[in-house]
Amino acid sequence: MNVTLRTMGLFMVLMLLFTGIGYVLGGVFMEGNWILGAALFLGLAAIMNVISYFLSAKIVLWSYRAKIVSEAEAPRLHKLVRGICLKADLPMPRIAIVPTQNPNAFATGRNKKNAVVAATEGIMVLLSDDELEGVLAHEMAHVKNRDILIMSVAATIAGAIAFASRMVLWNSLFGRRGNGNMILLLVVAVTAPIAAMLIQLAISRNREYKADREGALMIQRPLALARALEKLEKGNMRKPMQRGSPATSSLFIVNPFRGGGMMISLFMTHPPMDVRIKRLRELADETGFIG
């Protein structure tokens, strides 16, 4: 419950940040009509949320060229996911394959009945059945907890904030505004996307830790998921994703666009991999599940 409340609180801050950009733009570009600017951006945020709710799965699948596959086309994936669903008492999601050698997986959709679990071609080559089952259980934990909806909407709002901030930046650099307004616009243009990213990352990290734990408990093999994460971390550094938007990176089990290495942990879309693996090993010791 605490994690859920914290996530919803961070999500509300993200919404307020987007509305705040509208407030500033209303004051500068609408002859001081700050409230109208805020109202317009609040309405825009509501529209984006509705679109995300109904179309997020289609948008994400389209952006990565993912193809929904039947059991005859992908028997291994269907078998593993069906087994997880039986253990966790969850409805069977649709299964998709992403045509890339980047080893990864994600889940999307608005609820359990409309979920899609996608795996890349690369992950199916890299992982054993036990390890792949751990990854798929992690994704089904996201489905169970409705993380797929929260993170899809958060990614949409964060992406909109980044786009609006770029517009503000160009207007502040090339528009004819007073010095005071220009400074204000520059501050908003620089700080708003950074704040949005940090909030989105905080939401993502909270959900990843929880999905690691619940997914490992679903299959009673925390170490299988730990081994998979180790392989995926190295695999993503060798073969980063070449298609798609970094705004959706939080949907994947491992950041597909950058590996670990020199990246400052504050700006990582996922929790530090060594911490995730450590927690899974501690869970194995705690429960006695050693598979």
Image (tube, rainbow, N blue to C red):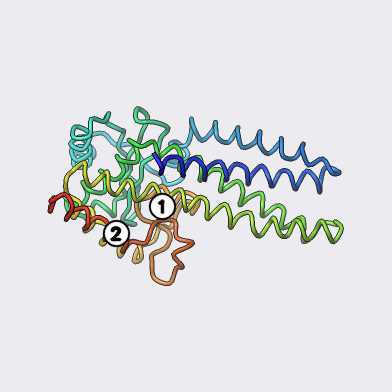
Q: Residue at x 23, y 53 (%)?
A: 225
| Residue 94: x %, y % from top left | 31, 33
Q: Is residue 12 above or below residue 129?
A: above
- In which quadrant is the N terminus drawn? top left
Q: Residue at x 30, y 65 (%)?
A: 234
Closest to the observer, 60 or 19: 19
In space, the residues marked 2 and 1 are separated at their CA atoms by 17 Å
Closest to the observer, 279 or 194: 279
Closer to the eye: label 2 or 1: 1
Q: What kind of element bears circle 2?
A: helix
Q: Is residue 21 above or below residue 266?
A: above
Q: Could you tell whether 166 is left or right of 209 in the image?
A: right
Q: Could you tell whether 248 is left or right of 186 in the image?
A: left
Toward the front, the furthest residue is: 2
| Residue 49: x %, y % from top left | 55, 34
* Residue 126 visible here: no
- As shown in the figure, which amino acid type bears the numbered disc 1? Arg
Q: Are marks 2 and 1 in contact (CB under 8 Å)?
A: no
Q: Quadrant of residue 67?
A: top left
Q: Could you tell whether 154 is left or right of 262 in the image?
A: right
- Find residue 288 and name its label: none
Q: Quadrant of residue 86?
A: top left
- Find residue 205 and name its label: 1
- As shown in the figure, which amino acid type bears the numbered disc 2? Leu
Q: Residue at x 18, y 43 (%)?
A: 219
Which is more N-terminal, label 1 or label 2?
Answer: 1
Closest to the observer, 69 or 237: 237
Residue ID for mark 2: 232
